[in-house]
Image (cartoon, helix red, strand yellow):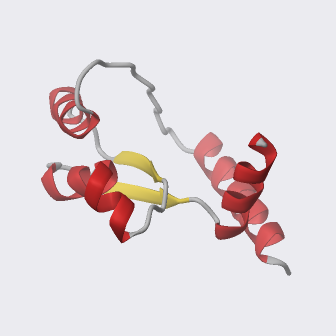
Amino acid sequence: MTPSSSSTLNRRRLSTQLSTEQVKVETRMEMGDPRDVICDVAEKMGVDMVVLGSHGYGLIKRAFLGSVSNHVAQKSNCPVLIVKRPKNSASTTSSSRG
């Protein structure tokens, strides 16, 4: 099984599991520094978990730009799940922008 087919299978399993269980997902748009806003909104809403994506920047980019996911993971009062982009999709995305 290739890494790509494995991740597709995992997404299907997760999707099936979430559809059979009572999982509430909410998307919001807020203004401000994302690091602080995500923590504040999560606390105000009393969420069970925050799920964030990660760009997977290297050490130098993280030093200049900061890491939203790292900040939220350190400061949030609830569990934080950080989802990394598969390595093979990063090159596909950047090459398709042309």
Q: Nearer the viewer, residue 22 or 11?
A: 11
Total marks in image: 0
Horizontal and vertical percent position of residue 95? 77, 52
| Quadrant placement of the N terminus | bottom right
Give the side of residue 85 with respect to residue 79, left or right. Answer: right
Residue 67 in view: no
Measured from the top left, where is residue 22 in percent x and y? 50, 38
Query: Does any portion of residue 3 appear in the rendered image?
Result: yes
Work out which quarter of the rendered image holds the C terminus and state it. top right
Q: In the displayed structure, would residue 22 be above or below residue 10? A: above
Name the residue: 31% across, 49% down.
Answer: 65
Look at the picture and state if 83 lies above or below 25: below
State which quadrant residue 29 falls in: top left
Q: Is residue 98 left or right of 17 when viewed as pictured? A: right
Residue plotted at (79% across, 68% down): 4
At x 75%, y 41%, the residue is 97
Q: Is residue 43 above or below residue 67?
A: above
Asked where in the image residue 27 lies, by quadrant, the reply is: top left
Q: Residue 39: image x %, image y %? A: 19, 39
In this view, the residue in front, 74 or 25, is: 74
Residue shown at 77% from the left, 56% from the top: 92
Q: Residue furthest bottom?
A: 1
In the rendering, at what x and y percent does residue 48 appear? 29, 44
- 8 displayed left or right of 38: right
